[in-house]
Amino acid sequence: MITTASGLFLRSPDGTGFHFDPGALCLELLCTGGPGGLARWESLHEPRDLADWLGRSRLGLRPDDVVVSAGELAAGRALRDALWRLARSAVRGDRPDPGDLAEVNRAAAAPPPAPRITADGTRAWALPVTGGQALSAVARDAVELLTGPSADRIRECGADNCQLVFVDTSRPGRRRWCSMERCGNRHKVRALRARRETEEKTAR
């Protein structure tokens, strides 16, 4: 599972920006939209959009290093929607849908990007990378997550109006919020207001 990254910078409907680290490459893809009501957040409209997302992901690719076709864009959206349903099944302890598993397995069967050693001894990718190769890396990351020791650490944000999914990598396993900058702080503010209202009523 590809876990080394600093996370993503997302923007709330009200325009507020916040940092979000879902803990896995495959869960980063969920931030581009999704099935059902999540379609209103759709950001993968053109092949270039998928290349741009890959440039922000923890794969460490530049958008110009990725060649995405229209078919690969459609495959990316299908993989993402399947991952949404599988992640929710994992959170709720439900049996995964066979069709969604097949979608992930289909993407994972393609060759992933090939790693290489550069002249200065660092690790890089053999370029260019196709959309299918990048999606294979995402799907393989999902297989590792959903079948590995972190499968029972997949969480959904505890806020009523947030559906973001993440891997709880905290040592005690008690992470509740997608981001303390966003939902965590909002919860603290609401809890503080509730305490003050209770104190005021008691003091009367």
Image (cartoon, rainbow, N blue to C red):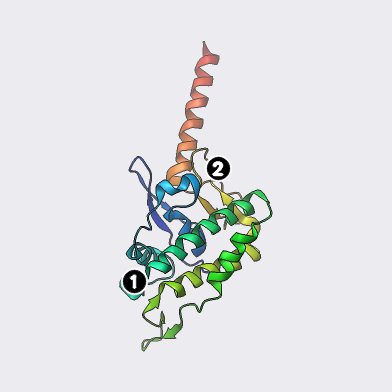
Residue 122 vs residue 125, the one in the foreground: 125
Task: Find the residue positioned furthest to the front.
Answer: 71
Look at the picture and state if 161 lies above or below 78.
above
Can you say whether 124 is above or below 108 in the image? Answer: below
Which amino acid does the dot numbered 2 rest on? Answer: Gly
Please indicate whether residue 163 sits to the left or right of residue 124 in the image. right
Residue 126 coordinates in the image, percent (x, y): 40, 83
Question: Residue 74 versus residue 96: which sits nearer the camera?
Answer: 74
Residue 55, picture quadrant: bottom left
Which residue lies under the disc numbered 1?
62
Looking at the rendered structure, the secondary structure element under dot 1 is loop
Give the quadrant of the N terminus. Answer: bottom right
Q: Residue at x 62, y 56 (%)?
A: 153
Image height of 193 relative to 106, above or below: above
Residue for point 46% across, 60% down = 77
Q: Nearer the viewer, residue 1 or 30?
A: 30
